[in-house]
Image: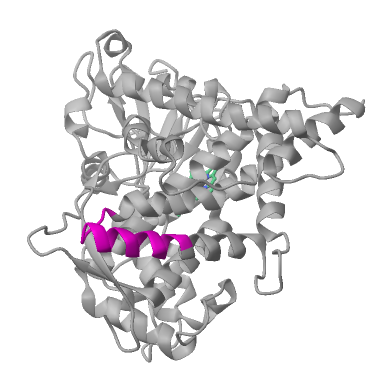
Amino acid sequence: HFNKEIPGGLRQLPGPTPLPIIGNLLELGSKPYLSLTEMSKRFGDVFQIQIGMRPVVVLSGNETVRQALIKQGDDFSGRPDLYSFQFINDGKSLAFSTDQAGVWRARRKLAYSALRSFSSLEGSNAEYSCMLEEHICKETEHLVKEIEKVMKTEGKFDPYRYIVVSVANVICGMCFGRRYDHHDQELVGLVNLSEDFVQVTGSGNPADFIPALRYLPSKAMKKFVEINNRFQCFVQKIVNEHYATYDKDNIRDITDSLIDHCEDRKLDENSNIQMSDEKVVGIVNDLFGAGFDTISTALSWAVGYLVAYPDIEKRLFEEIKENIGLNRNPTISDRSNLPLTEAFILEIFRHSSFLPFTIPHCTTRDTSLNGYYIPKDTCVFINQWQINHDPKLWQDPSSFNPDRFLSEDGSEVNRLDGEKVMVFGLGKRRCIGEVIARNEVFLFLAIMIQKLCFEEMPGEPLDLTPEYGLTMKHKRCNVRASLRLKDGC
Ligand code: HEM
């Protein structure tokens, strides 16, 4: 890698000097999004660090990341073969595996079309514009009841614990055609373990880069393997039930539609991409995992910010009261009429940057960026946090201020500013759940704000410091909530 000759006219990547064996591990520290943002100030938008013996290119800056992921999209669209990724979805994950371009593209297309058709399917009655809306409305109804119940018995609750079950039920509805009770031990146990998953999959996990570390006993790694197995078993059981009851004339959900695709393919002699049935049906595992962890993390940050900024919470409630009233549920089509709510969500994405790096990328061929040479098979980190906090793009980036996205009279969201917020990645690997995610975060939040008023627990101050991982969560906390009456709490 290092010894490869640099083609004429291109420069060698800048970066900090690595130590033997550990490379720049110490400088990376426990909050790599901060340390790598600091380094980008010294070395620029494209620089190289070494983790263990392995070189990693770190990209920052809106323009540079757009150039790499969009204009040179194919060059940067691979995934590196990281140690921890082989445990995810039995090594067959769509998002994390090193599938060759043809196979990955075919799977991504399948995942995208299954997701789109089962979220936009007609609802069971005219009250709902689509299945996604129906699932969310029904789940928020359960959620509000559960919160009311726990407030009566305990007087406080951990918002993540409740939100994650509701969000998981929305994606379960689309993937598996079923929902779980808020006290179902199997589901509640599973979805409350995602902290242990995201800790290991965060960019820069030392065991991914330093082979010797894999042989030391590690609690985090052991838990990680266990969670992946549990997750796999949970999904496999449901998939088996689907195979047993599959009827090609009645495709009930995403799992059925993936099974159906396998059956169709067997009849199609011209199909040229070779994929096992497991790789096709295993897509549902990725959709379920990505579909609950990200959105529940976003909503749990939303509750955190509501509690930390009661004035903003009040303004959000007023906006909903004025535009929708209190007699009907908000719907997805209300999104364009609630600019403050939209701005609040954008500011949560930007300020928390709870997905600080995309999933790591990898170059698929020798390439260059901003005049620097980057060889094939180089691991690449995309620092989304840096873009969302870059003082060149944002005034006073560290303050939480939804108004930064609004026009002066507050009646409109500035689209161009909204597009600068980077949480879904860009280009070929861009999140396939983005449209659903934006609608889902909006609708959950709008309904919660309409029905509930969240407040800090006296004596239990919130700690909104993010804990590093693939998705960053704030520490678990307790808040209280009361049902909204006409004019406030
Ligand atoms: C990939 C963000 C919700 C499915 C990603 C990536 C990011 C991301 C940053 C990696 C992009 C890259 O590697 O460059 C988010 C955020 C969400 C969200 C912030 C919610 C607020 C969802 C949902 C689904 C989903 C709801 C599906 C139900 C996926 C899949 C990939 C992905 C399958 C892998 C794509 C690939 O490797 O080709 N997402 N996501 N995501 N996301 Fe999401």
Residue 416 in magenta? no
Q: Main secondary structure of the magenta part?
A: helix
> On the rendered image, what quadrant is the C terminus found in?
bottom left
Q: Does the rendering let one see residue 71?
A: no
Residue 150 is a magenta residue: yes
Q: Is residue 352 above or below residue 189?
A: below
Residue drawn at x 25%, y 20% is: 219
- Total marks in image: 0
Q: Return the residue found at the far front.
A: 153
What is the quadrant of the N terminus in the image? top left
Nearer to us in this view, 187 or 294: 187
Residue 43, compared with residue 407, is above or below; it is: above
Q: Residue at x 52, y 26 (%)?
A: 232
Compare residues 411 and 143 and report the one nearer the observer.
143
Q: Tell me where residue 247 appears, x and y as whole percent.
A: 83, 37
Say if residue 317 shows up in the picture.
Answer: yes
Residue drawn at x 53%, y 37% as measured from the top left = 76
Q: Toward which corner of the image does residue 257 lie, by quadrant?
A: top right
Colour approach in the figure: one colour
Q: Is residue 329 left or right of residue 102?
A: left
Q: Which residues are magenta?
A: 142-158
Q: What percent of the width, then of the height, locates residue 179? A: 55, 48
Q: Give residue 211's quadrant in the image.
A: top left
* Residue 342 vertical placement versus 203 (above, below): below
**Front position in the image: 324 or 81:** 324
Q: Is residue 276 left or right of residue 358?
A: right
Picture coordinates of residue 112, whole percent (x, y) = 66, 47
